[in-house]
Amino acid sequence: MHDLSLERNPIEILETGRSISDIIDGKIRQLYSGSEEPFYVVNLDNILERHLQWISLLPRVKPFYAVKCNNTTAVLKMLSALDTGFDCASKAEIELALSLGVKPDDIIYAHTTKPLSHIRYACAHRVNLMTFDNEEELLKISLVHPQAKLVIRIAVDDSKSMVRLSPKFGARLPTVRQLLGRARELNLEVVGVSFHVGSGCTRSSAFRQAIEDARRVFDSVLGFQMRLLDIGGGFSKIGDFQEKFEEFSEVINGSLDEFFPPVSGLEVIAEPGRYYVESAFTLAVNVIAKRVVVEDRANKCRVMMYYINDGVYGSMSCITFDPAHMTSCAKKSEPRYCSVIWGPTCDSIDKITESYWIPELYVGDWLLVDNMGAYTVSVTTDFNSFEKAHIYTVVTAETWHSLNLSPHLYLTSLACCEYRVFCLLHCRMFSCF
Ligand code: PLP
């Protein structure tokens, strides 16, 4: 077990009877006099729940958490304490995982187009498992990491996913034999097959098809002892998907049993990102400015323009590349106005919602956005040098003790000030299908 305590960002205990809303409430009260900066509250118990569900529903599949999805130290420490592996995409991600005590054997360097110096770094730190999908990569690996254990990534049907990856990555099936032949010529060891059905996969049939495709690769391999199947990422539990995670896991288990029966001794891993962190993070942002614009003078049509202190160059970049949208949880009876919500930067791309019918907001109001764990904190930029949202982490004492973690915690104290909070941007939901 690893030590979950963080020197600079201590983790708070979520006392019995207190909720995440209470914690956010306390933070806003603390901030009220000094600052209105955006912040996240992370509920580590939520990550534990996801993990327990994963191991109960996908018992054959060891998760290697995709660090790119959210590289918050507390999250990585929590997952490491839960004995997951890690999918790293760069030297810096490998460095981060190793610095937290992750063993090199628990890392897969899952990027098929790696800089030479990063492969050299992986070699120097005994990170051996890595993916490839092209001949140039094999040449680089043979040059600086000839002992690597290679996993061939194949392109699969990702047309049912929010974010497609196969246009960029993955060997097409007809080229696989030739690539494996080249690996053999270079004396490299290929130990398995990987794929990624695309992030935010909406159809479990994509996994079934991809597992069948992987089987074909196993069948066509001559001379390699293939022993690993990596079913990638793409899992989610939120959003208006037609199928639930439970149904996905049934299809995955059935396909694994059909194409790779347990007697085959195959090791199965996955690279879930979104699944683990999406709902653990709640973001609180502040309305820092407001303009009322009269669009149609004859009809006196007013549009409210609100400016909040986090946007698409910050935590909400996911709006532009995940087809995500915000939805309001305001009471139906409240009067609503056509509103545009902008991020804080000097760029008009920095728009969070358009023609959004919500109750009137005022400067100083807080908006809470839930499900903000995936591809948010790890994607923020420094554009305009706005402060990045601070991350406060909480965990229940029960989880803390069950994981045998160290007791460096602090408790929040509440100041007493008045403020207004709207839980308006309540859900990140996926609207693609
Ligand atoms: N593995 C690889 C190689 C990826 O590119 C990604 C996401 O882009 C992931 C895993 C994580 O995917 P997800 O967050 O959809 O589970």
Image: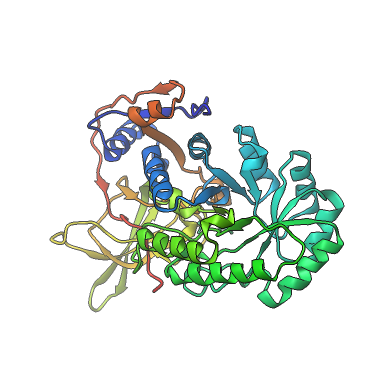
Residue 281 in sight in this render? no
Query: In this image, 342 relative to 128: left or right?
Result: left
Side of 283 relative to 300 (left or right): right
**Quadrant location, ligand no. 1:** bottom right
Q: Position of residue 328 (x, y in %)?
A: 27, 59
Does residue 331 appear to the left or right of 185 in the view shown?
A: left
The single residue placed furthest to the left in the displayed view is: 333
Q: Quadrant of residue 244?
A: bottom left
- x and y, in percent, of residue 258 in the image: 49, 66
> Colour scheme of this structure image?
rainbow
Q: Which residue of the protein is positioned furthest toward the front in this rendering? A: 263
Q: Quadrant of the C terminus?
A: bottom left
Whole-percent x, y for residue 188 in the image = 81, 56
Please name whichever residue, 28 or 429, is drawn nearer the observer in this view of the structure.
429
Residue at 13% in and 61% down = 333
Tell me what residue is drawn at x 69 percent, y 60 percent: 112
Q: Position of residue 408 (x, y in %)?
A: 45, 21
Please tell me whether residue 63 is drawn above or below residue 99 in the rendered image: below
- State how many labels appear: 0
Q: Nearer the viewer, residue 269 or 337?
A: 269
- Which residue reaches farthest top? 407
Q: Is residue 95 above or below residue 430?
A: above
Instruction: Tell me if residue 160 can be seen.
Output: yes
Q: At 34% across and 55% down in the image, what residue appears?
A: 290
Indicate whether 46 appears above or below 397.
below
Q: Quadrant of residue 354?
A: bottom left
Q: Residue at x 33, y 57 (%)?
A: 427
